[in-house]
Image: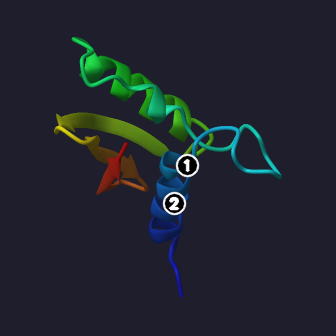
Amino acid sequence: LVNAIEETIQRCKILLNIRQGCFVYNKLLGCNLHQLNKADENIQGNALLLVKEALMPVVQVSVCSVEPIVSEDDITLKIKIKAYNQYADLEVTV
């Protein structure tokens, strides 16, 4: 049985891993994290804004922090959220 926090985390993971516009039944579902640029001087601020935008439909969640880790191949975002007075860590690779 999945509890509320687990369901909320799962929903956040789905929203952060689907490119906005790719889900046939709801073109607004997903995020625009693919727009992040490794060379951007304000990558942390832009990542934070894009994560907050993606998770806006999940009213139980507040985004505490987003830490981008840039490698040669991709960008990994370490995300801390708060929901139901509990904290959770998420990781997304862009």
**Where does label 1 land, which residue?**
15
Few, some or many C-alpha atoms within 10 Å of disc 1 (few <14, some 14-19, many ≥20)? many
Q: Position of residue 51 (x, y in %)?
A: 43, 34
Is residue 91 toward the left or the right of residue 70 in the image? right
Nearer to us in this view, 90 or 83? 90
Q: Position of residue 84 (x, y in %)?
A: 43, 56
Q: Nearer the viewer, mark 1 or mark 2?
A: 1
- Residue at the far right: name it: 25
The image's mark for residue 36 is none
Q: For the residue labelled by badge 2, is the local secondary structure a helix, a strand or a loop?
A: helix
Q: For the residue labelled by badge 1, is the local secondary structure a helix, a strand or a loop?
A: helix
Q: Position of residue 62 (x, y in %)?
A: 42, 39
Nearer to us in this view, 9 or 82? 9
- The amino acid on which the numbered mark 1 sits, given as a three-letter code, is Leu
Task: Tell me what residue is drawn at x 32 percent, y 54 percent.
Answer: 90
Q: Quadrant of residue 86?
A: bottom left
Is residue 15 toward the left or the right of residue 85 in the image? right
* Mark 1–mark 2 distance (CA, rounded to whole Å): 11 Å
- Check the picture and name the quadrant holding the C terminus: top left
The image's mark for residue 8 is 2
Task: Tell me what residue is drawn at x 36 percent, y 19 percent.
Answer: 46
